[in-house]
Image (tube, rainbow, N blue to C red):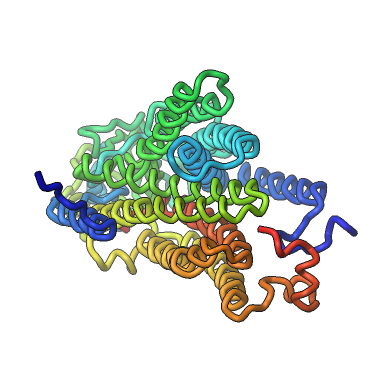
């Protein structure tokens, strides 16, 4: 009975990579990791005509409520009294206003936790045009889907920190490894001259002949 | 003065000076972290990732057929790494509560913030990791027969590696089975690589110049690493494809940019590994002492570069692939 010959190790490794890539590429596309604001009532920068009884924020991913998930302040920074926020369907945060808003400019700030554990936060202004009686808000002007996801810009410092770490490690590694390889190729004593400022023979006295 | 004398092996730093410098760094980081909890979260998660992966990888290397290091030094290193990873994990939960509460140190008393963190992915991840770290510690401390110790070691290492999948991007991306498979393969392979390197360095030191033993250790390590690196790259490429919504995200998002930086450093590491594998290992195996000396230095360089890769990974884990 003939035994099948085992595939060479490199061929097996290549097959694993190709198979993994094939399976991965054949699967549906990914979802986004961080929740982003996609709808808002009132909409950012809009003017509300009429009574605003509640504010509502819709996200593209499931979120978790955290302390101070929604706050509304006047343009002077005075907080507006709100009820406790309610999460509906995992993606929509709604909070009722305890008092009617007088005419003026306001800032709505929100912060939620994405399912991947990251805190997302942002704020946007809106205005109330008329001190209201019992007339309902003009939703056509104040609500709806946002033209583009609203959120804070990504900070640059993580990229800079990662780049600095990589450059430091990469340059250090390149210098040390190159010196070692040249020493092995050329017969010079590795690391001896640079460390001791003396000839390669001196480093041998410090134990270079040992492993 | 004698403590500062240069030797071919390493630059000697007086232990007292090193301890004082480390103490200063820890104190400065603690103070800055209390003022900016998100910094504390970054630091503790990075320390937890590096020490947890190192402990898991080293204990796996001690258990499996990889290079067998000198038992006392490896055992004490695993125990220390496990302790640091445990403490870093618990501290990261505290900083996570502060970050979620968003109102400074008062946030620790915020019940909602505590619930969100402890009942969410972060709490589960740290709880599972701590269990794994206890198993890892028991595996190197137990007086039981080798089989029980190996069981604790493998279970603990896999649990520690798997715990990193319970929080972060693995929770929000799909298909879940593929993401988990790729992530687990990637984390376990990274642990095997960095742990194997540390184990190899300890073993070479314990070989006391025996070139036959050194050649055997190096050849065995090189064989093991071809499989480990293949798994690492396959898992990493799979995760990148699953996480990034489009190729442009590689340059347009902070996640993509940090990933590119990480890949550049890993490529450099692979060049060093190739130089070791194809040039130095054959020379060392043929008994050239100088090649073994250069290899030991290169292995130390690889360890430092790999730890840097893990630190960059900790930064990467807190970015959004979707922008």
- What count of labels does the image hold? 0
Q: Position of residue A168 (x, y in %)?
A: 58, 67
Of residues A90 and B187, the one drawn nearer to the viewer in this rendering: B187
Task: Tell me which residue sits at (48%, 52%) in the image.
Answer: B310
Question: Which quarter of the rendering shows the C terminus of chain B?
Answer: bottom left
* Quarter where residue A165 is shown: bottom right
- Whether residue A182 is visible to the viewer of this picture, yes or no, is yes
Q: Is residue B195 above or below residue B270?
A: above
Note whether residue B37 is visible: no
Q: Position of residue B243 (x, y in %)?
A: 27, 53
Q: Residue furthest front?
A: A1
In the image, farthest residue toward the right: B1
Question: Which quadrant would residue B226 be assigned to in this image?
Answer: bottom left
Q: Nearer the viewer, residue B80 or A42?
A: B80
Quarter of image, res B162: top left
Q: Nearer the viewer, residue A31 or B283?
A: B283
Q: Residue furthest left?
A: A1
Residue B36: where, in percent of width, then height?
Answer: 58, 47
**Residue A112 location in percent, x, y?**
36, 41
Q: Residue at x 70, y 59 (%)?
A: A210
Judge left or right: residue B29 versus residue B140: right
Quadrant position of the N terminus of chain B in the picture: bottom right
Residue drawn at point x = 64 percent, y = 35 percent = B72
Image position of B232 (left or right of A75): left
**Image check: B223 left or right of B19?**
left
Q: Tell me what residue is drawn at x 46 percent, y 25 percent.
A: B152
**Residue B295 located left or right of residue B131:** right
In this view, the residue farthest toward the top is: B144
């Amino acid at each position: 009975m003939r035994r099948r010959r085992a595939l060479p190790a490199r061929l097996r490794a290549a097959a694993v990579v190709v198979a993994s890539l094939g399976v991965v590429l054949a699967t549906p596309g990914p979802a986004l990791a961080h929740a982003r604001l996609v709808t808002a009532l009132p909409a950012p920068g809009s003017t509300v005509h009429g009574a605003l009884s509640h504010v509502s924020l819709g996200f593209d991913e499931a979120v978790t409520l955290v302390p101070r998930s929604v706050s509304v302040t006047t343009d002077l920074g005075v907080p507006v009294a709100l009820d406790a926020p309610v999460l509906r369907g995992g993606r929509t945060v709604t909070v009722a206003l305890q008092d009617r808003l007088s005419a003026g400019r306001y800032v709505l700030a929100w912060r939620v936790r994405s399912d991947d554990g990251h805190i997302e936060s942002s704020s946007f202004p809106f205005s109330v045009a008329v001190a209201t009686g019992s007339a309902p808000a003009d939703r056509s002007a104040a609500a709806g889907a946002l033209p583009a996801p609203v959120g804070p810009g990504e900070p640059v410092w993580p990229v800079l920190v990662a780049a600095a770490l990589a450059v430091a490690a990469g340059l250090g590694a390149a210098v040390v490894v190159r010196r070692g390889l040249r020493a092995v190729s050329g017969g010079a004593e590795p690391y001896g001259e640079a460390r001791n400022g003396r000839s390669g023979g001196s480093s041998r006295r410090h134990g270079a002949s040992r492993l | 003065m004698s403590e500062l004398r240069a030797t071919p092996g390493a630059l000697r730093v007086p232990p007292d000076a090193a301890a004082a410098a480390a103490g200063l760094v820890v104190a400065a980081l603690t103070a800055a972290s209390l003022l900016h909890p998100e910094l504390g979260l970054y630091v503790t998660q990075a320390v937890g990732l590096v020490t947890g992966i190192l402990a898991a990888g080293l204990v796996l290397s001690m258990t499996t057929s990889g290079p067998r290091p000198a038992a006392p030094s490896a055992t004490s290193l695993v125990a220390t790494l496990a302790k640091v990873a445990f403490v870093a994990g618990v501290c990261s939960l505290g900083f996570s509560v502060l970050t979620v509460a968003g109102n400074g140190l008062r946030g620790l008393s915020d019940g909602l913030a505590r619930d969100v963190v402890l009942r969410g992915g972060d709490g589960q991840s740290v709880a599972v990791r701590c269990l794994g770290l206890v198993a890892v510690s028991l595996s190197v401390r137990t007086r039981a027969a080798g089989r029980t110790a190996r069981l604790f070691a493998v279970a603990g290492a896999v649990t520690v590696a798997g715990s990193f999948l319970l929080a972060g991007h693995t929770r929000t991306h799909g298909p879940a089975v593929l993401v988990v498979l790729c992530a687990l393969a990637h984390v376990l392979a990274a642990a095997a690589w960095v742990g194997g390197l540390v184990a190899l360095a300890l073993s070479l030191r314990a070989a006391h110049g025996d070139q036959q033993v050194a050649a055997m250790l190096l050849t065995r390590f090189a064989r093991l690493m071809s499989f480990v690196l293949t798994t690492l790259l396959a898992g990493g490429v799979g995760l990148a494809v699953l996480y990034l919504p489009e190729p442009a995200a590689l340059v347009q998002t902070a996640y993509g940019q940090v990933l590119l930086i990480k890949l550049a450093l890993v490529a450099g590491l692979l060049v060093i590994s190739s130089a070791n594998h194809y040039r130095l290992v054959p020379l060392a195996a043929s008994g050239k002492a100088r090649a073994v000396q250069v290899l030991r230095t290169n292995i130390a360089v690889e360890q430092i570069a790999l730890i840097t890769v893990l630190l960059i990974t900790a930064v990467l884990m807190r970015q959004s692939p979707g922008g």
